[in-house]
Image: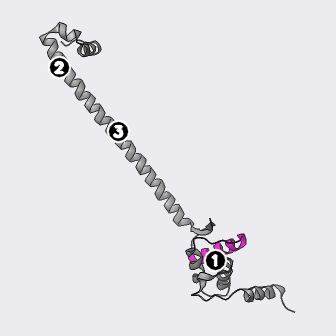
Amino acid sequence: MRNPLASALIFVTLSLPAYSKTDLSTAIPNDLAIGCNEALASGQDARPFVEEMLRRADLPLEKISAYRAMQCINTVKGDRYLYEDRQFVNVTLRLAQQQQAREKRLAVKQQDRESEAQLKLATLEREQAYIGAVLKVCVDEYNRDRFRALTTRICGDFFKARGLPE
């Protein structure tokens, strides 16, 4: 008596188109997933199937085929892959890229903060230089002509805020 599961497997295997390892570029996506798992199960090299599935940018797979293909790719590559947006994505690589992007954003933010601080410092230095120049002019004017220094608007405001020179 024959095992019905074995008969079904033989039927599926025989009904799949036979692709040579060099002709996988024309293979139907679901056949790639099945071929990959069959190659693993029979101890053959599944890398050509994996490479072809990873090479394709648009790989429409049914859910079960996507799951089986992920298992096969993960086994062959020894890394974790997900089927997303009709292609397989290396999870480790994606996490590294996300971390790198996050670090780049943080570096840009830090650089922006440093630039802003430098701008504030430069503005403060210019303001201090201006205040120093006004102080010198107003004190010189006060020493020459007190009335004029006190009635000149900028010097008057300055003396109101800072007090009269001694």
Identity, as a three-letter code, of the amino acid under mark 3: Ala
Magenta region, mostly helix, strand or loop? Answer: helix
Residue 26 occupies quadrant: bottom right
Q: How crowded is mark 2: few (under 14 residues within 10 Å), some or many (20 or more)?
A: some
Q: Quadrant of the N terminus?
A: bottom right
Q: Is mark 3 on a helix, strand or loop?
A: helix
Q: Which of marks 2 and 1 is in front?
A: 2
Residue 46 appears in the figure: no
| Span of residues in magenta | 60-81
Residue at 46% from the left image edge and 58% from the top image edge: 100
Kindly state the secondary structure of the residue where label 2 is placed: helix
Tag 1 residue: 72
Q: Mark 3 points at which residue?
A: 117
Name the amino acid, label 2: Val
* Residue hosting label 2: 137
Measuring 64% from the left and 77% from the top, which residue is drawn there?
A: 72
Give the alpha-carbon distance from disc 2 to disc 1, as whole Å.
83 Å
Rendered position, 100 above or below 65: above
Residue 68 inside the magenta-drawn segment: yes
Mark earlier in primary sequence (2, 3): 3
Q: Is residue 135 above or below residue 66?
A: above
Say left or right for 105 vs 66: left
Lower sequence index among marks 2 and 1: 1
Disc 1 to disc 3, how far (Cα)?
53 Å
